[in-house]
Image (cartoon, helix red, strand yellow):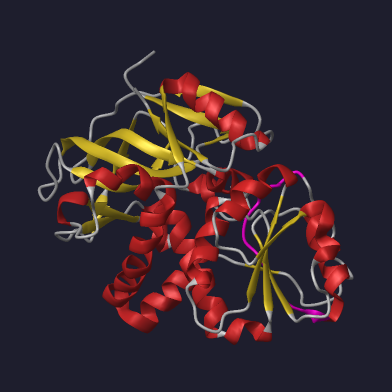
C-alpha cells in the first residue's frame, strides 16, 4: 500500500467499501499536509453517510471517482508539511477529517486558536464543519480527554442545541419528552442536559429491549420503554418527540398513539436508517428536521462566538465527567479495522456502552 490512502464508500450502496491509494501531490503555497492520527467513529458518522447526498456530507472530501464518497469524522491530526507561514510542522489540530491516512488543507482566517478550511468547494458548506482548532491554544483541550472529545463533543454540541431549542420554546408546552434510540450517545447527552433543568418535562427513553438495562442504569430518564411497549406511554399528556432513530414505523406509531397531543416532533438521527415509512397523514405536529449547524449559526449570532463556546464548555464539563463511567473505549488500527468498525456500525451491532477510536496506523 502507498504511503497515503483513503477509506471510501459506494454512494449507491453504503455496504460496499474500498481503500483508495492516493498520491501525495506537492503542496501549493499556503497549504498544509496533515497526518490523521486518531478519530472517533460512531452512529453519527453513519448518519453523515446516509445523508451524504441530501445534506452535502460527501462534498467535504470528494473522492476522485464521483461514484464513491468519503465520510467525514471528528478527531486529531498533526501537520507534517507546510507552506503556510502561520502553521508549522508538528502542530496538533482538532477537526473534521476524511477516514484516511493524510489530508491537505488550505487554511484561511488563521488566528492563534483556530483556522478555517478555505477551498472554494467548502465555502458553500456548513461553517461549523470548516473550523479547525489549534490544540495548544485551546483552553478546553485536555490531552487526557482526547478520545472523549472526539467521540462525544460533536454529538454533545447537537444535544446542547436541541436542549436549547426545547427550553427556548418552553418545551412546546409538553409535559413529557420522548427520546428514541435512547441508548445512543446523542440521546443520552440530550437527556443529561434536560435532566439538569428546573421544571423540565418528564423524560421517557425509547429503546430496544436488549438495551433497557443500560439506558435505565444511566439514571437520566424518568422512564425507559421498549419499542414494542410504546403503548405504555401516556397518550393523554402533551408530548414532544425527539427522534434519534429515524425508525419510520416507530415514529408513526407514536404519532398515532398520541394523536393531537403530540405537540412537537423533531427528526435528528438515522440510527435505524433501514426502517423508513411515509409520514403522510400523520396526526399531531408535523415532523421537522433538525440541522445542528443552522441552530449553531443562529446562537453564534445571538450570543457571539465566545459566548456560545463558553455556554457549550460549561455544559460539556459535567457531562464528560459522567460519561467516562458509561463508555468502554476500544481502538482499531489500519484499513481492515476501519472496514470492520464501519460494517458493525452500519448494521447497528455496536453495544451502547462501547465506543471506537480508529487510527490509520
Q: Is residue 21 magenta?
A: no
Residue 242 shows up from this direction: no
Rendering quarter of residue 177? bottom right
| Residue at image point 53% right, 81% down | 167
In the depicted structure, whether residue 71 falls above or below residue 140: above
- Specify the quadrant that holds the N terminus: top left
Direction from residue 326 to residue 84 in the image, left or right: left
Closest to the observer, 242 or 23: 242
What is the x, y in percent for residue 216?
Answer: 62, 54
Relative placement, left or right, of 88 versus 138 is: left
Residue at image location 49% in from the left, 35% down from the top: 63
Viewed as shown, does residue 274 lie left or right of 282?
left
- The image shows a total of numbered marks equal to 0
Compared with residue 307, is residue 65 higher up or lower down, i.e. above or below?
above
Q: Is residue 173 visible?
A: yes
> Percent position (x, y) of residue 11?
63, 37
> In the image, is residue 315 above or below residue 29?
below
Left or right of 261 in this view: 272: left
Task: Using the rendered view, name the quadrant where residue 108 is placed.
Answer: bottom left
Q: What residue range appears in magenta?
A: 261-274
Q: Is residue 240 above or below residue 218?
A: below
Whole-percent x and y of residue 52?
Answer: 59, 47
Amino acid at each position: 500500500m502507498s504511503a497515503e490512502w483513503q477509506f471510501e464508500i459506494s454512494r449507491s450502496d453504503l455496504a460496499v467499501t474500498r481503500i483508495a491509494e492516493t498520491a501525495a501531490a506537492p503542496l501549493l503555497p499556503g497549504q498544509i499536509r496533515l497526518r490523521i492520527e486518531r478519530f472517533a467513529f460512531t452512529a453519527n458518522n453513519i448518519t453523515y453517510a446516509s445523508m451524504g447526498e441530501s445534506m452535502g456530507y460527501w462534498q467535504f472530501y470528494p473522492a476522485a471517482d464521483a461514484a464513491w464518497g468519503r465520510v467525514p469524522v471528528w478527531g486529531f491530526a498533526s501537520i507534517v508539511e507546510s507552506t503556510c507561514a502561520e502553521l508549522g510542522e508538528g502542530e496538533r489540530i482538532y477537526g473534521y477529517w476524511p477516514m484516511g491516512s493524510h489530508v491537505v488543507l488550505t487554511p484561511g482566517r488563521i488566528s492563534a486558536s483556530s483556522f478555517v478550511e478555505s477551498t472554494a468547494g467548502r465555502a458553500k458548506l456548513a461553517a461549523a464543519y470548516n473550523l479547525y482548532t489549534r490544540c495548544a491554544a485551546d483552553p478546553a483541550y485536555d490531552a487526557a480527554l482526547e478520545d472523549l472529545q472526539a467521540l462525544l463533543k460533536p454529538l454533545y454540541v447537537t444535544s446542547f442545541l436541541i436542549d436549547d431549542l426545547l427550553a427556548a420554546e418552553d418545551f412546546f408546552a409538553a409535559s413529557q419528552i420522548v427520546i428514541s434510540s435512547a441508548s445512543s450517545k446523542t440521546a443520552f447527552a440530550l437527556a443529561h442536559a434536560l435532566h439538569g433543568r428546573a421544571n423540565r418535562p418528564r423524560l421517557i427513553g425509547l429503546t430496544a429491549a436488549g438495551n433497557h438495562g443500560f439506558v435505565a442504569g444511566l439514571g437520566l430518564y424518568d422512564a425507559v420503554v421498549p419499542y414494542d411497549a410504546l403503548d405504555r406511554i401516556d397518550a393523554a399528556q402533551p408530548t414532544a418527540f425527539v427522534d434519534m432513530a429515524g425508525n419510520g414505523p416507530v415514529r408513526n406509531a407514536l404519532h398515532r398513539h398520541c394523536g393531537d397531543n403530540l405537540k412537537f416532533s423533531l427528526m435528528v438521527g438515522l440510527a435505524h436508517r433501514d426502517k423508513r415509512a411515509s409520514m403522510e397523514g400523520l396526526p399531531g405536529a408535523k415532523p421537522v428536521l433538525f440541522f445542528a449547524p443552522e441552530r449553531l449559526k443562529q446562537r453564534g449570532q445571538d450570543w457571539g462566538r465566545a459566548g456560545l463556546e463558553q455556554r457549550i464548555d460549561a455544559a460539556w464539563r459535567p457531562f464528560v465527567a459522567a460519561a467516562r463511567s458509561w463508555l468502554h473505549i476500544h481502538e482499531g488500527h489500519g484499513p481492515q479495522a476501519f472496514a470492520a468498525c464501519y460494517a458493525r456500525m452500519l448494521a447497528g451491532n455496536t453495544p451502547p456502552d462501547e465506543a471506537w477510536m480508529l487510527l490509520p496506523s
